[in-house]
Amino acid sequence: MHCLPRLLMCVSFFIACAHTIPQYEVPKAQIEVFYPKGFEVSIPHEEGITLFAFHGKLNEEMEGLEAGTWSRDIVKVKNGRWTFRDREARLALGDTLYYWTYVIYNGLGYREDDGVFVVSAYSNATINTNAGGAKKKPPTDVGTRDANCKPTPTFRNGIQVNCAKQLLFEDDFTGAQLDRSHWTVERRFSTKPDYEYVLYLDDASDVLSVWNSVVTIKPKLTTRHFQHEDKPLKAKYDLGTHCTGRPNSEECVCDGAATRYISVPPFISAQFSTKDHFSFKYGRVEIKAKMPNAQWVFPQLWLQPVKQEYGSDDYQSGQMRIAFTFVNNEQMQLFGGLIVNANSTWRWEKMCEFPHADRLYLGNDFHIYTLVWTENEISVAVDNTEYCKFRPDNDGLLADLLRQGDALPNRGLLKSGSKMAPFDQEFYITLGYGIGGINDFPDMNFWRPEKPWGNTSPHGMGSLVKKVDFDHWLAGNGDMRIDYVKVFAI
């Protein structure tokens, strides 16, 4: 008779204890749906989380803990969040996503069950939904989105974006190769205006690789790639139908037999861009990268114009350099800014140098390179330290630039644009690795060791090849690495 009260007392004690022990709750998943395709599901990171899993189905309820159409474990946190991403799924307004999530926290598993998300708005842009082609905004979730949505002048792929600070583009390179829905890998000869000494190929896996969520570019000798060890390729070489340059032009065909000076470039490198995939006007670009620590080479972290509105020659329609480095006297120098003409008279006019860049060890470690582009100014920073700004209201229009009494050759076209011209059009991202060339290493600089070629010399490529010991030249930190790329609306 005395056992029952004692049992009830024990049960009550354990229930009370259970209520005093803090219970972990899986964070509510944040879901973003993009037009025309793709969606993301994420939770914020906190200490103790080692895995996040997402299981979901579209327009069909989950049966208990079934795997679902989407079933994936995420084992690596990126930028403070655990993120599941599907770039191909097309979710329409009104679709319903049924899901459950799972988190391992401090070695124990926890679930959030019975998740339901109705697609009431797209996270990226205004879209064309009516047959007449007029812009129509999709419905918005007033309770969760409008309160934090501020207007922005940013455009993405020709369409104005809804909200400021919105993530427009992201690639953290989690696959085994570049995502071809984001990037076009170049297959072409380098040509004007810079004629860098490289051949860009899309099938050299030891030059361009993706591993452990990092893109690596490390050039190689052309002769080794084509297994001609003792002599350069002199014969006519055609990159074929997969060439990304203009067909039958010098971008696709190199006829070394036609001249004693021009041959296939001595180095194989890589370049890839978002051209025909993603472009934008006004925004913030953030790239985390390690620069190549070797002489006579340079990284390509650029924004390039979709259309040549202000001229097609010599960067007349502009190029924005998020970062540009070279090594001189064993010290790496960092530059960023704008190029309005490739000619040496103008090339460095709107470029800025970061002071004492050698102290940052840019060739050894990853750093964050940022370019902020608004309707009124463009600025460049490294690790949140701004070192270059162009503001036409203070600095004057680029159309009014004068150098030794001369104006830019496309001044008339620039005058027809806005105060930001030529930087008032949509641009796309280009990433790559260049060597030598006729413009990026000025002859007038005091180079140590001495620069082995002159920019006007027809023998420049050969002079550089003879000067460097390739097996040691790019050894160690001579590669370039990219951890992620992000673009936000302003």
Image (spheres, rainbow, N blue to C red):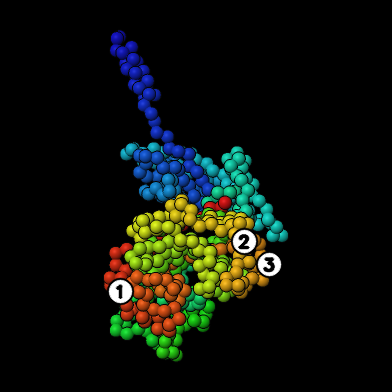
**Which residue was labeled with disc 1?**
470
Label 3 near label 1: C-beta < 8 Å?
Answer: no
- On the question of residue 479 being in view, the answer is no
**Which residue was labeled with disc 3?**
416
Locate residue 368, reporting x and y percent. 43, 54
**Which residue was labeled with disc 2?**
396
Instruction: Name the residue at 45% across, 90% down.
Output: 258
Give the mark nearer the N terminus: 1 vs 2.
2
Few, some or many residues within 10 Å of mark 2 (<14, 14–19, 20+): few
Few, some or many residues within 10 Å of mark 1 (<14, 14–19, 20+): few
Give the mark nearer the N terminus: 1 vs 3.
3
The label on residue 220 is: none
Few, some or many residues within 10 Å of mark 3 (<14, 14–19, 20+): few
- Of labels 1 and 3, the one closer to you: 3
Q: Distance between the residues labelled 1 and 2?
A: 45 Å
Whether 129 is drawn above or below 456: the answer is: above
Residue 317: image quadrant is bottom right
Give the mark nearer the N terminus: 2 vs 3.
2
Locate residue 85, reporting x and y percent. 46, 52
From the viewer's side, name the closer residue of 10 and 2.
10
From the viewer's side, name the closer residue of 95 and 302.
302
The quadrant of the picture occupied by the N terminus is top left
Amino acid residing under circle 1: Phe
Amino acid residing under circle 2: Gly
Locate residue 173, reporting x and y percent. 42, 58
